[in-house]
Image (cartoon, rainbow, N blue to C red):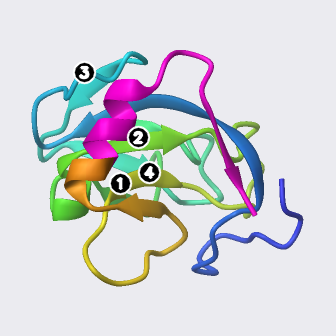
Amino acid sequence: MSSAKREGDLRTPIGTFPLRGGFGVRADPGLAMGWFRVDSRDVWVDDSGSSLYNTHQRTPADGRWSSAEELLNSPAYDYAQVVGYNESRTPGRGSAIFFHVDLGHGTAGCISLPAGPLLAVMQWERPGAVMSIR
């Protein structure tokens, strides 16, 4: 894990990370690691002070976190996969690193591909797949 990565720095972490299950607005594209379809209650907690930091949760927050990324409101999340970065959930080290649909501009630290190639990779992957970022 890159020691320079911090929450909100807009940087992609450097290293080799496991690829985990996926999620999206659309139906499972055939990802072997599991899939859940998001709705308006799905969020990824980015509040470093929460015990739920860097995890998928469902609203309402009810005081469990003060900030979280909504997973329904971006076309980037039509198809997305969790990159196993900061799985120890160390506060402030970064959260919500995903492999998702490219929107034609930079990401906030994620990795993106156009939808067609992204789906091809997702369908090719097998459990145990990793992503190396240099």
Q: Which residue is mark 1?
A: 100
Q: Of marks 3 and 2, which one's residue comes earlier in the chain?
A: 3
What x and y, as percent, mark residue 69?
Answer: 36, 60
- Alpha carbon separation for disc pair 1 and 2: 6 Å
Can residue 60 be seen in this snapshot?
no
Q: Is residue 1 left or right of residue 74?
A: right
Q: Of marks 4 and 3, which one's residue comes earlier in the chain?
A: 3
Q: Which residue is mark 2?
A: 81
- Which residue corresponds to the image point at 73% horizontal and 71% vertical from the top-left? 6
Q: Is residue 101 left or right of residue 28?
A: right
What x and y, as percent, mark residue 75?
Answer: 16, 62
Secondary element under disc 2, as helix, strand or loop, is strand
Q: Quadrant of the rendered structure where residue 48 is?
A: bottom right
Q: Which residues are magenta?
A: 118-134
- Which residue corresponds to the image point at 53% horizontal and 55% vertical from the top-left? 97
Q: Which residue is mark 4?
A: 99
| Residue type of the residue flagged with mark 4 | Phe
Looking at the image, the residue that sits furthest to the right is 3
- Alpha carbon separation for disc pair 4 and 3: 15 Å
Confirm or deny contact between disc 1 and disc 2 (CB under 8 A).
Answer: yes
Q: Residues within 10 Å of mark 2 (few under 14, many from 20)?
A: many
| Residue type of the residue flagged with mark 1 | His
Can residue 64 be seen in this snapshot?
yes
Secondary element under disc 4, as helix, strand or loop, is strand
What x and y, as percent, mark residue 98?
Answer: 46, 52
Q: Which residue is mark 3?
A: 30
